[in-house]
Image (cartoon, rainbow, N blue to C red):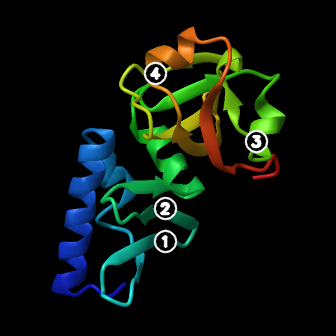
Amino acid sequence: MSESADGNADLQSLRTIAAYQFGGGAGEALFPPTESLSIKRTTSGRPQQVHAETGRIVSFGIDGRFTLGIEGGRRLTTALAHPAYRVVVDDESEPFVREGKNVFSKFVLEAGEEIRPGDEVLVVHERGELLAVGRAELDGAAIGDFETGMAVSVREGVPIDT
């Protein structure tokens, strides 16, 4: 991304959207002002994906919300207080989630209360390690209460070797 006035305006706008979607501090965590980021645009010029050297941070949907990449998930795991936007699983689920398989409610140990259906979430091990990113299918309370049904549609898992 060039350091033009338009690029800076884009990043400020993206930070604002991140703060709205994930809470205070998320914008600076995802898009630090000191880092050079690459913004891939649609043919109309709208930001579509934001990449760092370490990988895809987010994609920007036409609905005005972000979908997280693994790099974005790592950054939010560090920035957001536990259990915000997290769905916590244990050893039994870890290998499946890392492979990109969905998370089912009966295997969830804890979920952030603020989670709503359709929200982007971080699937983490009870040790705090990021295992995957995905979309919540239920709200936080239901994820913890239900014994059946899909809790998170996993988009991308973190392989064991990373």
Give the residue number, with chain letter if any, for mark 3.
101
Quadrant assignment, res 147 = top right
The residue at 64%/44% (across/down) is 154
Residue named by callout 4: 140
Q: Position of residue 65 (x, y in %)?
A: 35, 55
What is the CA distance from the residue labelled 4 to the residue labelled 1?
29 Å
Q: Residues within 10 Å of mark 3 (few under 14, many from 20)?
A: some
Return the mark for residue 57: 2
Say few, some or many: other residues with alpha carbon within 10 Å of mark 1 (under 14 / 14 to 19 / 20 or more). Answer: many
Secondary structure beneath label 1: strand
Between 17 and 4, the residue placed more toward the observer is: 17
Q: Do residues under tags 4 and 3 come within 8 Å of each other at their CB atoms? A: no
Question: Does any portion of residue 27 appear in the rendered image?
Answer: yes
Q: Secondary structure at mark 3?
A: loop
Query: The N terminus lies in which quarter of the figure?
Result: bottom left
Q: Is residue 54 above or below residue 145?
A: below
The amino acid at mark 2 is: Ile
Please state which amino acid type lies under the numbered disc 4: Gly
Q: Nearer the viewer, mark 2 or mark 3?
A: 3
Marks 3 and 1 in Cβ contact (< 8 Å): no
Residue 37 seen by the camera: no
Kindly report which numbered mark, 2 or 4, lies closer to the viewer in this rendering: 4
- Mark 2 near mark 4, Cβ–Cβ under 8 Å? no
Image position, residue 145 (x, y; %): 55, 9
Q: Earlier in the sequence, mark 2 or mark 4?
A: 2
* Res 51 label: 1
Query: In the figure, is residue 60 to the left or right of 162?
Result: left
Labels 4 and 3: the sequence-earlier one: 3
